[in-house]
Image (cartoon, rainbow, N blue to C red):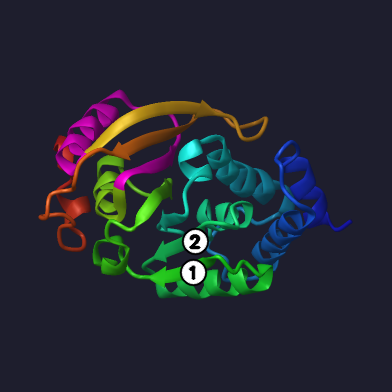
Amino acid sequence: MSTAEQAVHAALEGRALSALQLAQLATVLQVLERDEHAPTTVRTAHDAAERHLADSLVGLDFDYLIDARAIADLGAGAGFPGLALAVALPAARVALLESQRRKCEFLERICTAARVENANVVCARAEEWTAGAAANDAVVARALAPQPVVLEYAAPLLRLGGALLDWRGKRDEREEHESASAAQELGLERREIRAVQPFAAATDRHVHVFVKVSATPSRFPRRPGIARKRPLGGL
């Protein structure tokens, strides 16, 4: 068994994944280690298995993702959580949304190497992805931006009843208050903030869940860059 395979088995013990899925994820780790253009500093098999794969797959503990058939990963970067979720959820179609061409090219390479056929790379800003408007059962984001900004990116892409799952670190009372205000303006409602521990050394990790309960006003999305310059909720 290769080092990557060993790391995957150790990090994902207890996850109901097939031999094929485990092999695909081992290939993902091998690409991260070998591709000098991988857009992450976490590249060794052991560390990446925990901090990328195990962290991503805590999403499998949420019915919103288990039941989703169309998922969008905002700012996919090196492919997490979206790529790992695509492997674990073969019945879902996962859009890896990334605005930087170099990262998009890496995502194409890693999807091809791991033979992840249900993931597609969308090289565009979230505000400009018109094909994804109101088309997704779930949107995921991991350490992307202040939460009110993530909410504004996600809301127009969700269908009614769809959910945003936002991976974040230590809780911030002020940001959560501002996020609640932003969510209301966007047609979203916070349903849960769940503490997670994807691996033994993980601390202060949470997944925030927002559900789209009403149509997002037509003024959203605003022009590219505006969500960060003038975030909703008073941030």
The residue under label 2 is: 93
Can you say whether 123 is above or below 13 in the image?
below
Quadrant (top left, top right, bottom left, bottom right) of the C terminus: top left
Q: In terms of image quadrants, where is residue 20?
A: bottom right
Q: In terms of image quadrants, where is residue 14?
A: top right
Disc on res. 200? none
Q: Residue 170 in magenta?
A: yes
- The residue type indicated by label 1 comes to Asn
Q: Choose between 42 and 156: the one closer to the eye.
A: 156
Gap in angstroms between the C-alphas marked 1 and 2: 8 Å
- The residue type indicated by label 2 comes to Arg
Q: Position of residue 73 (x, y in %)?
A: 43, 55
The residue under label 1 is: 120
Q: Choose between 69 and 78: the one closer to the eye.
A: 69
Q: Residue furthest top?
A: 173
The magenta segment: 160-187
Residue pictured at 42% horizontal, 75% vertical: 101
Look at the image and tell me whether residue 235 can be seen.
no
Quadrant (top left, top right, bottom left, bottom right) of the N terminus: bottom right
Look at the image and tell me whether residue 37 can be seen.
yes
* Residues at discs 1 and 2 in contact (Cβ within 8 Å): yes
Residue pictured at 31% horizontal, 51% vertical: 158
Residue 93 is left or right of residue 131, and the answer is right
Residue 145 is left or right of residue 226, and the answer is right
